[in-house]
Image: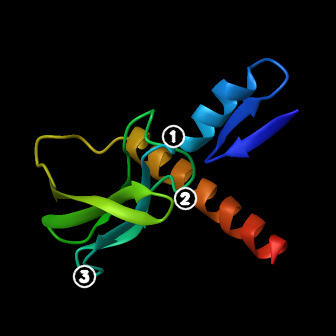
């Protein structure tokens, strides 16, 4: 038996009840929302499920040399902190397929979540 919690699973057959209750009560820090000027960035995507245990990542396409991206973090859809990032185009970095693949992977995940949420309604 398992219980889903912010993308994590609690295996109730291999943990004590006390430990499971403690784990459920400790919600992981999550990305609540990401904001950016649409004139500066398009197709901004970020992992919206799960906690930040693996770190924070987002991807998009810069339409201007510089953009500010604001990330709201929190617990259970309540914002507890906000971080601002300035991203800049660099003339010294070669454009590689790796960046395109990262964006595509995140975009596909976002579309799959959207489809899943639509089916559940």
Identify the residue shown where x is 51% and y is 40%.
26
Number of other residues with Cα within 10 Å of mark 1, as a class: few under 14, some 14 to 19, many 20 or more: few
Q: Secondary structure at mark 1?
A: loop
Identify the residue shown where x is 59% and y is 34%.
23
What distance separates the C-alpha of mark 3 from that of mark 1?
Answer: 38 Å
Residue denoted by label 1: 26
Q: Earlier in the sequence, mark 2 or mark 3?
A: 3
Q: Is residue 7 left or right of residue 75?
A: right
Number of other residues with Cα within 10 Å of mark 3, as a class: few under 14, some 14 to 19, many 20 or more: few
Q: Is residue 1 above or below residue 99?
A: above
Q: Mark 1 and mark 2 in contact? Answer it, CB < 8 Å.
A: no
Q: Is residue 16 left or right of residue 31?
A: right
Q: How many marks?
A: 3
- Single out the mark in the foreground, 3 or 1: 1
* Residue at the front extreme, as displayed: 18
The x and y percentages for residue 78 are 42, 65
The x and y percentages for residue 59 are 38, 54
Q: Secondary structure at mark 2?
A: helix
Residue denoted by label 2: 107
Q: Is residue 12 left or right of residue 92?
A: right
The x and y percentages for residue 69 are 24, 64
* Residue at the top extreme, as displayed: 14
Q: Is residue 43 above or below residue 2?
A: below
- In the rendered image, the quadrant that contains the C terminus is bottom right
Q: Earlier in the sequence, mark 1 or mark 2?
A: 1
- Single out the mark in the foreground, 1 or 2: 1
Q: Earlier in the sequence, mark 3 or mark 1?
A: 1
Q: Secondary structure at mark 3?
A: loop
Residue denoted by label 3: 39
What distance separates the C-alpha of mark 1 from that of mark 2?
Answer: 29 Å
What distance separates the C-alpha of mark 2 from that of mark 3?
Answer: 19 Å
* Residue at the right extreme, as displayed: 1
């Amino acid at each position: 038996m398992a219980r889903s919690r912010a993308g994590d699973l609690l295996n109730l057959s291999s943990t004590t009840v006390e430990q499971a209750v403690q784990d459920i009560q400790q919600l992981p820090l999550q990305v609540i929302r990401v904001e950016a000027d649409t004139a500066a960035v398009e197709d901004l995507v970020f992992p919206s499920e799960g906690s930040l245990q693996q770190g924070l990542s987002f991807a998009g396409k810069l339409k201007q040399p510089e953009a500010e991206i604001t990330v709201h973090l929190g617990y259970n859809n309540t914002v507890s902190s906000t971080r601002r990032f300035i991203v800049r185009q660099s003339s010294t970095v070669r454009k590689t397929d790796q960046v395109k693949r990262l964006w595509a992977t995140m975009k596909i995940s976002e579309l799959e979540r959207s489809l899943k949420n639509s089916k559940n309604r």
